[in-house]
Amino acid sequence: MIDLKNTDPNFKWEIVKQEGGEDLLKCFGCSDCSASCPVRYFDERYNPRRIIRLTLIGIKNEVLSSPFLWFCAHCHACTERCPQGIKVAELINGIKNYAVAQGYYPSGLKAQLNLLNNQGRLYEVEEFDLKKRQKLGLPPIDKRIPEIAKIIEGSKVLKKVAQ
Amino acid sequence: MRNYALFLGCTVPVRAQHYELAARGVAKELNIEFVDMPNASCCGFPIKALDAETSLLIAARNIGLASKMHLDIVTLCNSCTATLSDAQLKLKSKEFYYKFKNLGFSYPNEIRVRHFVRMLYEDIGIENIKRAIKKPLKSLSVIAHYGCHYMRPSYLYGFDDPEYPHTLDDLINATGATSIDYLDKKMCCGGSVLGVDEGLALTLANHKLSVAKKAYADALISICPFCTVMYEDNQRKVEAKFNITFGIPVLYYPQLLGLGFGLSQDAVGLKFNRIKTDSILEKLT
């Protein structure tokens, strides 16, 4: 039973404003996304339709604090099948982005952000790597791309996460 | 000579040099010139879940670099292909373009972004590849793993069939090897949930490794470094979790193609494959 007194009717409008969230209201709940989802196939805890319905009804806390939101592999199997033309994987990503702004995200993502902030790459390029590349006849690569930190600096949300 | 800007991304140049080596090797055989992109960064995908717009600005900056070189981008990673393609679409939005320009970046020439395998299929073509094969790999049967972002989302690519892809199978068959047909070709490797729930990621990887085993495949052919992390680097973990033995070599498509071109095993970097490829080499002698 859902007690509508505890729902937030504004939640869906917040998501619509997100990058990827534009098409949220088009969902009529057919469940094609869940039926197409490879993650859902193996683990019933993840259910894209449920996340979208909870968002539309406004059960904000459950959507934002649930670890299952992060189970989306962003594989776009759902996007290809949605009869409403919703870019479902982008919509789920938009909900993730909103959750991040509210302080909910897996710690691994913060580590990835810090790596990009420090070096502009996910993996550190060590002397060993450069030597191995040279030995194989591969051209050298830049260890750091400082411009990436400048781009990240422009995002309020990322500045908060990186702290 | 055809020229392309080669976008390496994060993983390939430090964790999958054998993929890069083989890609450059087969490109040379096909008279393709790769121009490197100084100052290219991560594609931006790793932080998409945190902030999509910033991730796309990072991607767009890379597109700008190639645009200034007036060259189409060729990538070796599925996620890089999707993120760069997404940013390219996004550059058409005035609001995004304004932010991009304000960061001091520019996009002077319209360019294309494609995965290396797609470029081989479209610009070189199956017939020319067949003609370049010096040692047909007739004794090999393999399964093709496309990975998610090679043909999906179709609104970005408009290439191949998002439900029943065939281009990689065609390219494999062109080497003389047999690409085994199977169900669930578009199943995800699980790589993108590895950091969130390892057990779930291994379960997804197990699915296709099991398909390969049941089909007696000599190898699984990958075109994405993330997928290879799941099927090759984590194969032992999948074996332990599901109490099963695979020992299935995972080759990047350019490695397979290189063998067909008659390149040596060192030239396609086979010694860097983490699952031993001796069984394949024996079949080829």
Image: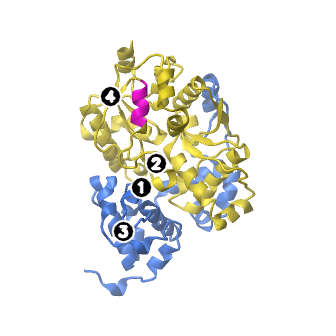
Spatial separation of the CA atoms under disc 1 and disc 3:
16 Å
Query: CA–CA distance between discs 2 and 1?
Result: 8 Å
Query: Are discs 2 and 4 located on one and the same chain?
Result: yes
Checking the image for residue A76, the label placed there is 1
Q: Which chain is yellow?
A: B
Q: Is residue A16 visible from the viewing direction of this image?
A: yes
SS for callout 4: loop
Amino acid carrying mark 2 in the image: His
> Is label 1 in a helix, a strand or a loop?
loop
Q: Quadrant of residue B4?
A: top right
Point out which mark residue B247 bears: 4
From the image, tell me which residue sits under label 3. A51
> Along the horizontal axis of the image, is A150 left or right of A111?
right
Q: Which span of residues is magenta-colored?
A: B168-175
- Badge 1 local density, few (<14 within 10 Å), some, or many (20+)? many
Q: Which quarter of the image is occupied by the N terminus of chain B?
A: top right
> Residue B156: x, y in percent?
51, 54
Q: Is residue B171 covered in magenta?
A: yes
Q: Which is more N-terminal, label 3 or label 1? A: 3
Which residue is identified by label 2?
B149
Label 4 marks a residue whose chain is B
Hey, what amino acid is under mark 1?
His
